[in-house]
Image (cartoon, rainbow, N blue to C red):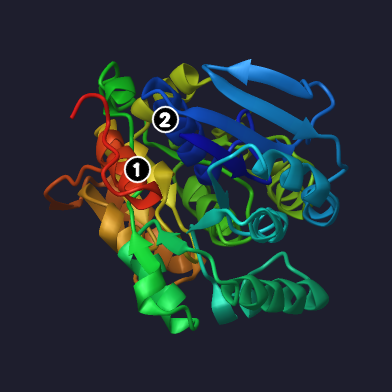
């Protein structure tokens, strides 16, 4: 089967969406399918064309992902003509992918990681005009007649239905985790309490809560430390983080890490006392699933799909404010964890479910 993926970002860009589609594309190739990815060349160092693990990648040199939305259509139409079906994701790639599919008469599927609705108006680091623009753009693409909307959790599935998508068009397929990668690492708690944040610098990630909570906690616990494993992308959130910490009382207790390999990332997580996920919403949260796979406890906001995904040792914030997060840090330092059975989200189950959506009767070679 020939499949075209139209994605605003693809590997090596960092994020849960990119992680899902990298694994999905590579597994599809492993199972004999022809896979092409049309995406944005966000870094001039990246090749315009290359093949990675059998996945054919075509990158378009646009300044940002919004230009990709408006000007990638001719390319999407061209590659759609060679494909049997098209798969895209929210948000910026959805429009050119949908229009190309309609022009070529091809089936099109969309994976929705999150449907924020009115949460757009509550998130920090977003201007008033941008809030309205993102809110109405989300409503716009939710009105498209995709063959199927694929939600990555029950929470996201319910959000899509609440936003007006017909229930019969929505399927839930949990993201898959490659547990073989995590099996090479064991949780080794450091001698001094060390909590870690890793992931994107998005407005929903709760960094506006984490930084003041960390500053208060670290000032009271001079032997504790925090690791921030974040990209170097220049935006308002990174400036807020840097300006809050640099020159402050706790500066020496904070370790910034950037652009780690998967091996380096897993090593840093495994050598942490816990991982902090203070997000305002999560559609699935690879960070949580990977942390659990490594056997590391989690401090969670319990928002969105985090209640579905988080398991093992954990603590939940009572409220969405920095004081509630600081309270969790104090309890974590005292090893006062809650616990429930570990949940797993298998990669093969994820791929199998996608194949069934693409074409009933298709199976993995290992079936």
Along the horizontal axis of the image, is 256 left or right of 166? right
Along the horizontal axis of the image, is 132 left or right of 284? right
- Whether the residues at callouts 1 and 2 have beta carbons within 8 Å, the answer is yes
Q: Say which quadrant the C terminus sits in.
A: top left
Query: In the drawing, what numbered circle is on residue 28?
Result: 2
Tag 2 secondary structure: helix
As drawn, 251 above or below 329: above
Residue 58 in view in this figure: yes
Along the horizontal axis of the image, is 300 left or right of 40? left
The crowding category of the residue bearing disc 1, from other C-alpha atoms within 10 Å (few below 14, some 14 to 19, many at least 20), is some
Which residue is disc 1 drawn over? 355
- Front-most of residues 103 and 130: 103
Tag 1 secondary structure: helix
The crowding category of the residue bearing disc 2, from other C-alpha atoms within 10 Å (few below 14, some 14 to 19, many at least 20), is many
Along the horizontal axis of the image, is 197 left or right of 123? left
As drawn, 130 above or below 230: below
Residue at image position (64%, 45%) is: 6
Q: Disc 1 versus disc 2: distance between alpha carbons?
A: 9 Å
Going from N to C along the chain, the mark reached first, 1 or 2, is 2
Relative image position of residue 326 (x, y in whole percent): 43, 59
- Front-most of residues 108 and 195: 108
Residue at image position (72%, 75%) is: 131
- Front-most of residues 219 and 169: 169
Relative image position of residue 261 (x, y in whole percent): 54, 20
Which image quadrant for residue 229? top right
């Amino acid at each position: 089967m020939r499949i075209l993926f139209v994605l605003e970002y693809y590997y090596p860009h960092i994020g849960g969406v990119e992680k899902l589609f990298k694994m999905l594309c590579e597994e599809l190739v492993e199972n004999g399918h022809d896979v092409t990815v049309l995406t944005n060349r966000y870094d001039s160092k990246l090749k315009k064309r290359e093949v990675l693990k059998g996945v054919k990648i075509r990158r378009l040199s646009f300044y940002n992902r919004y230009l990709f939305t408006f000007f990638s259509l001719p390319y999407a139409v061209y590659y759609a003509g060679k494909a049997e079906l098209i798969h895209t994701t929210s948000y910026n790639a959805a429009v050119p992918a949908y229009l190309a599919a309609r022009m070529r008469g091809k089936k099109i599927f969309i994976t929705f990681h999150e449907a924020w609705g009115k949460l757009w108006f509550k998130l920090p680091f977003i201007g008033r005009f941008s809030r309205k623009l993102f809110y109405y753009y989300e409503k716009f693409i939710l009105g498209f007649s995709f063959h199927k909307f694929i939600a990555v959790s029950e929470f996201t599935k319910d959000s899509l239905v609440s936003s007006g998508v017909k229930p019969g068009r929505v399927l839930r397929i949990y993201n898959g985790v490659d547990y073989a990668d995590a099996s090479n690492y064991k949780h080794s708690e450091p001698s001094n309490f060390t909590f870690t944040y890793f992931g994107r610098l998005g407005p929903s990630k709760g960094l506006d809560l984490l930084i003041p909570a960390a500053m208060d906690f670290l000032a009271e616990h001079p032997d504790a430390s925090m690791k921030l494993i974040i990209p170097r992308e220049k935006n308002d959130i990174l400036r807020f983080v840097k300006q809050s910490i640099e020159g402050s009382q706790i500066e020496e207790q904070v370790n910034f890490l950037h652009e780690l390999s998967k091996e380096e990332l897993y090593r840093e997580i495994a050598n942490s006392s816990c991982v902090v996920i203070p997000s305002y919403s999560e559609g699935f949260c690879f960070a949580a699933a990977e942390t659990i796979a490594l056997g590391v406890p989690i401090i969670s906001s319990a928002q969105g799909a985090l209640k579905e995904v988080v398991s093992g040792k954990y603590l939940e914030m009572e409220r969405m404010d920095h004081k509630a997060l600081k309270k969790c840090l104090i309890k974590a330092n005292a090893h006062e964890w809650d616990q429930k059975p570990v949940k797993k989200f298998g990669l093969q189950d994820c791929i199998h479910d996608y194949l069934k959506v693409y074409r009933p009767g298709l199976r993995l070679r290992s079936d």
